[in-house]
Image (cartoon, rainbow, N blue to C red):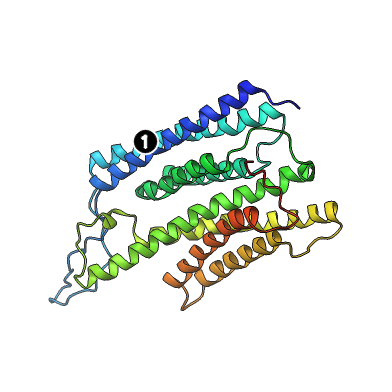
Amino acid sequence: MTPDPTLSALSDHLFSISVALYSVAVLAFCAQLAFGRRTTAVPQPELVAAGGAALPPQGPGEAAPEPASSRRWGRLGVLVTGLGVLTHIGVLLARGLSVGRLPWGNMYEFATAMVLVAVVAFLVLAVRMPAVRHLGAFVLGPAVLAMVLVGLFLYTDAGPLVAALRSSWLAVHVTAAITGFGIFFVSSIASIAYLVRTRYDAKLATGAASSDSTIARLPSAATLDRVAHRTAVFGFPIWTFAVIAGAIWAESAWGRFWGWDPKETWAFIAWVVYAAYLHARTTAGWRGRPAAWINVTGLVVMVFNLLYVNMVSTGLHSYAGLPK
């Protein structure tokens, strides 16, 4: 099918608009951090029983209320992010319609769709858990950077699929891989923030850090750990399905389920790393920072698999559609 130049141009324009909207959202979330409350707990007053005996503390207490200006910036960030998601969907929709196929047949389209999944995952969390909005700058910032790099270095003109990708398995395997990657991206960002937050809390406890630091406005360590774990739990079966679907497609296309092709190998390594994270997260001695580091390692493996394996290594998956 001959690409429709009008729809292709529309897709490119929407890509630029999406980057601009996400950039505005980053500024709004940064303002929320600047004007937000500290999430360090306020200790409750000591209770005294009859006879003057002190009772043990009843809990960590509630954090200070969120200032109205901070809430407004957070809501603005969520709203602009939502608008960006709509234009981002338009990028892929217009590109797909312009060539009459699914819009993830090369690295430009794959990476663009992956960032969309990551932003949507964060947006769902931000709507359901308002405290997570303080993480917005740390999710949207890398998302904007990723889209800029994708547009600069991975952009290719809309065109038909290469012969190796002309299969119904494209809609199954690649869609699952994009979804799993995007969700793992948010999970790993939450783990990075968790590592920063726990280090800050440890310094704060010893008086080596200021209680007015911007880091104090991040969600609590417990919230960040919970977000990282829940998103990984959601993304892991999707990535597992992507690996299995890829093996089935490989048997149909190449006559074998597994051949230790570089792409297959690193997809499996990523699966092992995230399985290790989920196991460590529930294992005594590995909970907390050790498990979070494993989750961050998973993101490094995923990015390596996307960029180095596609762009440098040679294998049966060397049809990334890189710009010529």
Residue 246 visible in the current orientation: yes
Residue 59 appears anywhere in the view: no
> Is 14 placed left or right of 103 in the picture?
left
Quadrant including the N terminus: top right
Look at the picture and state if 35 lies above or below 240: above
The extreme left residue here reads 52
In which image quadrant can residue 227 be found?
bottom left
Residue most extreme to the right: 255
Compared to residue 65, the image places residue 228 above or below, namely below
- Relative to residue 262, is residue 18 drawn left or right? left
Q: Residue at x 15, y 73 (%)?
A: 50
Residue type, numbered disc 1:
Val
Question: In the visual, does 149 lie left or right of 201?
Answer: right
Q: Count of labels shown?
A: 1
295 sits to left or right of 164: left
Q: Nearer the viewer, residue 119 or 7?
A: 7
Which residue shows up at 66% across the image and 59% down it? Answer: 313
Q: Residues within 10 Å of mark 1 (few under 14, many from 20)?
A: some
In x, y percent, where is residue 272?
A: 62, 67
For disc 1, the marked residue is 24
| Viewer-nearest residue: 47 or 28 | 28
Q: Secondary structure at mark 1?
A: helix
* Residue 7, image x, y percentages: 62, 24
| Residue situated furthest top in the rendering | 6
Q: Position of residue 120 (x, y in %)?
A: 51, 42
Q: 20 or 317: nearer the eye? A: 317
| 323 relative to 173, above or below | above
Q: Quadrant of the C terminus?
A: top right
* Residue 204 percent across, percent down from the top left: 23, 67
- Return the residue nearer the eye: 312 or 206: 312
**In the rendered image, which quarter is residue 31 located in?**
top left
- Residue appearing at x 84%, y 60% in the figure: 256
